[in-house]
Structure formats: C-alpha cells, structure tokens
Image (cartoon, grey):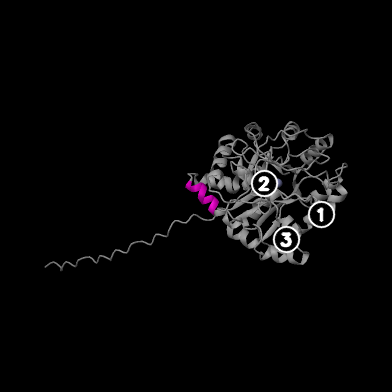
C-alpha cells in the first residue's frame, strides 16, 4: 500500500506591498543668498529666532532649509546702498528700465556693516547646535553635506570693505571668506558693475582698474573664488585674461533668453565652459522672464528654457543653482527654499534624468569648489 497522497499546502497568494515611488529629497547646494542682509535689517534681539525658528518673512531660515533639502551655499555679505528715494520694485516691474547706480562707497564706510554681517554668519553657526557650519575648504563642505549639516561659504558681494592696500582681504579671509565679487553693481575702486537695465547688454563700460587686477591676483593666491555675476563685460574679460581659476558666475542667467545686463551672453558662457567654470541659475524673475518683469506670477516654462539653454552652452558638469533667495522675487512655483523639491520635480517632468538632477542640485558645485578653493 502506498501512503495516501497529501496535497501540498499552497499558501494563499499575498500580493507584495510595493511602496509608492517617492524620489528622495535631493540635497541642493546653492550659489547665492542674501539671508545675512535680511537678518542685519532686523533688531539684533530678533535675529536668533528669525534664523532658528523663522519669522515667516523672506525665503530662508533653518527649518525651511531643512524641509527643502538645502544642503548649503554661498552666503553674501553685501553693503546696502544709501536710500535715494527710487521705488525699485515699481521700476523693475515696468520694463524697459534703467536703474541709476549709487556712488562708490569707501572702505571706511563699508567695513562696519561687513563686519556685522560676517559676525551674524558666524553666530548663526554657533547657535545652530551643529546644524549649520561655516566651511573654509571643499573638504569641509563635502563633510558637512555628507553629515546633513548645512554648509555655508562666506561670500563678499562687492569688495567695498577692502581698501587699496588689500589688508582687509586677509582679515576677512581669516574670518572665513572664500568667495568674492570685485563689484556688486555699484562701481568700486576695483572695477565697474552692470547697472540694472532691461533690455540691455552687459557691455556697459570700462573693466577692472589696476587695483582690481591686484585684487584678482591676491584672491588667486589665497584660493578665494572670484564671482563674475555683477561685473560688466569688460571686467569679465579682464578677470578671464588674468585669473588662474575657473570662471564662475554664481547667480546669472542666459542673455539670449532674457536681455538683462545681469545675464551672460553666449560668448561669456563659452568662456566659462572653456575654463571649466560654473554658472548658478538665478531664480530672480527679472532675470528669468522673457519680458524682464519682476512679477512672480509665471509658469515653469522660462525656468526650463534657461536651464536648457545653459546646459546646451555649458555642458551638464558646469551648471547649478544660484537662487538669490532673500534678495529677489522668485517664481511662485518655487516660493521659498522649501520649494526646491518642486523645482526639481519640474525639471524631472521636463525629462532631466536622476543623475543629471544630482549634478545640477549639488555635485557640480562641490566639484567646482574642489577645483577652486585651496
Ligand atoms: Zn547679486
């Protein structure tokens, strides 16, 4: 007799639980922000809370940075212009416009403000409980980003606090300064910036002065990155001829699409690409919209067109973001720093691959810092 055949027990089929595919938040390293100016303008006793908790104003604070995947960036020290009664918001929302530049501000007038802003940045680090670090080398930036610590680079937007002897450059370098624009749009003893004009060419006047050339050489020697974003075309050419570092425009867009003086011509983009440099896409609506208006009421289309054009001219290893958060009106789709994932989603929907998004979001900036900082 053979034993009875026992039918095998077939377990019920339980469909595997497939989690929805949610791409992880991609860390974003950013070419330019003005949070230091926002905090400077607050009463001193209100600054800590505005940084650590947020007060709802502007684009940046620590909680919103963490929500948006903001991994770090360049934090600008900028000397505000004296008030001249001009309503810039109205002016820049009704192109064509041509904003007159204020006069040169001397180092003795600029230094107290610059010191205060450097101090605010260093205090932001001290009170952050390890969540925020002022970095002085590419290795420090990489370590901070890997640890989920927001990595800051101290940047000087306009070299007004540096006098003709350049001594203050060394003092600011010791405080952590690793990036500098010889000019914001005002003239300095080092060169001439572009006035805000639309439509207009970046070829607006003379280039670097002899002191400007000395400043570029000293920055090269110290490993301080030189930012071309507010220089006019002649100054851009002078830096290109003199500097031994890659050419970098931290927060500028394509002049072929938005004819602002602040945007880069295809010729300038080719020079940046040749130097293995970098451009950060500026989110300022005035540099994105084809009509040059300031209004935030716009679709993603101009953002995508600028990204496509810059990618075509620079290649995929030399483009990133340069938000201008807390210094400009940005598209409603971005809103503030917590909107960075929405920007990446728009680029993803436009057909950008995940590896390309990683490059644009942070890998390209980190690689540029490897090539630039000493
Ligand atoms: Zn700027």
Near mark 1 (Cα within 10 A), the count class, few <14, some 14-19 or many ≥20, is: some
State the image coordinates of residue 180 (x, y, percent, origin top left). 75, 45
**Element marked by disc 2:** helix
Residue closest to the eye, 183 or 151 = 183
**Is label 2 or label 1 in front?**
2
How far apart are the two marked residues, 2 and 1, measured between alpha carbons?
A: 26 Å
State the image coordinates of residue 105 (x, y, percent, origin top left). 84, 46
Q: Residue at x 55, y 47 (%)?
A: 358
What label does residue 149 carry, if any? Answer: none
Q: On the picture, is 193 further left or further right than 146?
A: right
> Dot 1 corresponds to which residue?
113
Taking the magenta stretch, the answer to whether it contains residue 216 is: no
Q: On the picture, is 145 further left or further right than 185?
A: left
3 or 2: tag closer to the N-terminus: 2
**Element marked by disc 1:** helix
Q: Establish whether ligand 1 lies closer than 8 Å to the Cβ of label 1.
A: no
How far apart are the two marked residues, 3 and 2, measured between alpha carbons?
A: 32 Å
State the image coordinates of residue 281 (x, y, percent, origin top left). 62, 44
2 or 1: tag closer to the N-terminus: 2
Q: Which segment did they paint magenta?
A: 342-349
Which is the main secondary structure of the residues drawn in magenta? helix
> Dot 2 corresponds to which residue?
92
State the image coordinates of residue 21 (x, y, percent, origin top left). 44, 56
The quarter in which the N terminus is drawn is bottom left
> Dot 3 corresponds to which residue?
124
Near mark 3 (Cα within 10 A), the count class, few <14, some 14-19 or many ≥20, is: many
């Amino acid at each position: 007799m053979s034993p009875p055949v026992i039918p095998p027990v077939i377990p019920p089929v339980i469909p595997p639980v497939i989690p929805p595919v949610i791409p992880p938040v991609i860390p974003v390293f950013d070419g330019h922000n003005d949070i230091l100016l926002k905090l400077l303008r607050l009463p001193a006793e209100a600054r800590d809370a505005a940084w650590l908790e947020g007060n709802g104003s502007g684009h940046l604070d620590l909680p919103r940075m963490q929500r948006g995947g903001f991994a770090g960036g360049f934090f600008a020290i900028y000397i505000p212009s004296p008030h001249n009664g001009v309503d810039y918001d109205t002016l820049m929302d009704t192109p064509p416009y041509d904003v007159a530049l204020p006069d040169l501000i001397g180092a003795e007038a600029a230094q107290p403000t610059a010191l205060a802003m450097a101090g605010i940045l260093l205090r932001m680090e001290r009170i952050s409980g390890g969540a925020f670090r002022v970095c002085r080398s590419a290795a420090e930036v990489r370590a901070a980003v890997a640890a989920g610590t927001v990595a800051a680079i101290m940047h000087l937007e306009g070299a007004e606090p540096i006098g003709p002897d350049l001594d203050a450059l060394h003092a600011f370098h010791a405080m952590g300064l690793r990036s500098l624009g010889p000019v914001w749009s005002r003239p300095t003893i080092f060169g001439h910036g572009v006035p805000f004009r639309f439509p207009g060419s970046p070829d607006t006047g003379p280039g670097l002065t002899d002191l400007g050339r000395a400043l570029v050489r000293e920055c090269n020697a110290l490993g301080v990155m030189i930012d071309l974003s507010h220089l006019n075309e002649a100054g851009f050419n002078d830096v290109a001829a003199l500097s031994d570092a890659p050419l970098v425009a931290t927060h500028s867009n394509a002049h072929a699409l938005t004819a602002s003086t602040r945007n880069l011509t295809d010729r300038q983009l080719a020079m940046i690409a040749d130097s293995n440099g970098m451009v950060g896409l500026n989110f300022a609506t005035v540099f994105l919209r084809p009509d040059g208006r300031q209004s935030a009421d716009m679709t993603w289309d101009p953002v995508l067109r600028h990204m496509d054009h810059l990618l075509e001219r620079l290649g995929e290893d030399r483009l990133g973001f340069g938000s201008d958060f807390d210094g400009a009106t940005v598209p409603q789709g971005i809103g503030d720093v917590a909107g960075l994932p929405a920007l990446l989603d728009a680029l993803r929907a436009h057909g950008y691959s995940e590896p390309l998004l990683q490059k644009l979001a942070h890998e390209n900036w980190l690689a540029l810092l490897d090539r630039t900082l000493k």
